[in-house]
Image (cartoon, helix red, strand yellow):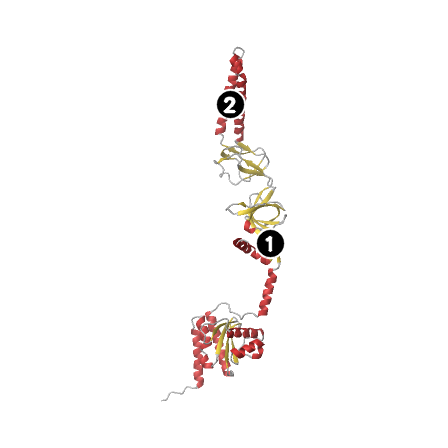
Amino acid sequence: MNAPQVGLAERVFAQFLALERQARAAQTLEQLAYHLVNDAQALFGYRHAALLIAGKVRALSGVSVVEPNAPFVAFVEQACAQLQRGDGLNTAQLVDIAQLGPQQQADWQQLSAGQVLWLPLLDRQQQLFGGLWLAREQAWNEAEQALLSQLADSYGHAWLALQPRAPWRLRWPKRRLLMVGAGLLALLLVPIRQSVLAPAEVVPLGGRVVAAPLDGVLKEFLVKPNQAVKAGELLLRFDATTQQAQADVAERTLGVAEAELKANSQRAFSDAESNSRIDLLAARVEQKRAERDYARNLLARSEVRAERDGIAVFADAERWTGKPVQTGERLMEIADPQQAELRIDLAVNNVIHLEPDAEVLLFLDSDPLHRHPARLLRSAYEAQPVAGGQLAYRLDARFSEAPPRIGLRGTAKLFGDRAPLILYLLRRPLAALRQTVGL
């Protein structure tokens, strides 16, 4: 028996199915882009095809690498941008040259064939993310347009299978981009209030410093941190072994000097030599008495008492107990709990212009949701090293309401002058750049 003859329609349909199968078999977007612009050329006879994704030419027929600045590439991108601003490119359509501007019409006549068919690539929400520009000399008939529209659906499905993320859109028109840019520029020029964050601590206001009255070793602390004390109450005690020994020796030395003076005074009536030594011995007695008084004074200083009512402000008694200290070394502070101020360490790289009486807000680490308002009182002229080796300016602020407990730490937010938003956002990068280049 003779095999049945295969007609033209069957061959065209078989080639159409092969195009769909090749598109879905692509493993990468680069392979798929090559198939979209080249494989259908034998069936539909177009001179050139261009694949656009998000308004940019991604592939060209007969070209392995797309040159972004090539005249044909620029023409296709500009033509599609103009058509998108008009009726849109969401449907398959024949492109009319009259829809383009004079420059694009002249480029069309030089760079492209006369009959152009646009095939959109749509995502699952029927939003345009790309398309095919097919150009040839012969007019496109209805059968070819129907087949290519169906083929575009398959191409779009294949592309989204390889790139399932949010679909791309054709680029916005230049007018819309200018409007968005102008809006962003206007937003960046909006004046806002500058602010900066810095670590802060609640410290006593007008407290009485308790310093070491002598060189020695601290024996014990009799109060605890933040404990209320009364004037005259014993705060701490030094190891007085040395001072007690010195006082005893001075007392006995004074007794010996007084006894020697008394003996010589009695012999002075009959002994001329004893009479001549009375003044010297009397002076020595006064010297020993002064040494005894000094030793007793040192012994009395070994117990330190509070000079006023308040609370004892210090970190930890264990840190001091058994440690040798020198005269004048700060041990604690006696302060009124109702009198406190805010100490702020503002890092050098965070400095902004702060007016006197600038607004300050304190957010405590123990209660970050509640803010404590304050006003800037004074600022240091020179930066000093703080914990961690960082340079910072010392700022002091007074609380507008009842102050928190002395010793609490937190973060202070300081408010400065108003400045454009762009300056607020780029303040630190500009400062780092200035320090780098030395301007």
Residue flagged by tag 1: what amino acid is it?
A: Gln
Percent x, y of residue 119: 51, 77
Q: Considering only order in the chain, which callout, 2 or 1, is on the residue closer to the N terminus?
A: 1
Say which quadrant the N terminus sits in: bottom left
| Above or below 148: residue 329 | above
> Which mark, residue 148?
none
Question: Residue at image x 54%, y 18%?
Answer: 279
Percent x, y of residue 168: 51, 69
Q: Spatial distance from mark 1 to mark 2, Cα to Cα? A: 69 Å
SS for dot 1 = strand
Q: How many tags in the picture?
A: 2
Question: Residue at image x 53%, y 15%?
Answer: 276
Residue flagged by tag 2: what amino acid is it?
A: Glu
Percent x, y of residue 10: 43, 84
Q: Name the side, left or right, on which 28 lies relative to 416.
A: left
Q: Which residue is mark 1?
A: 194
Percent x, y of residue 242: 48, 29
> Which mark, residue 251?
2
Question: For residue 419, which quarter of the picture?
Answer: bottom right
Question: For residue 81, which quarter of the picture?
Answer: bottom right
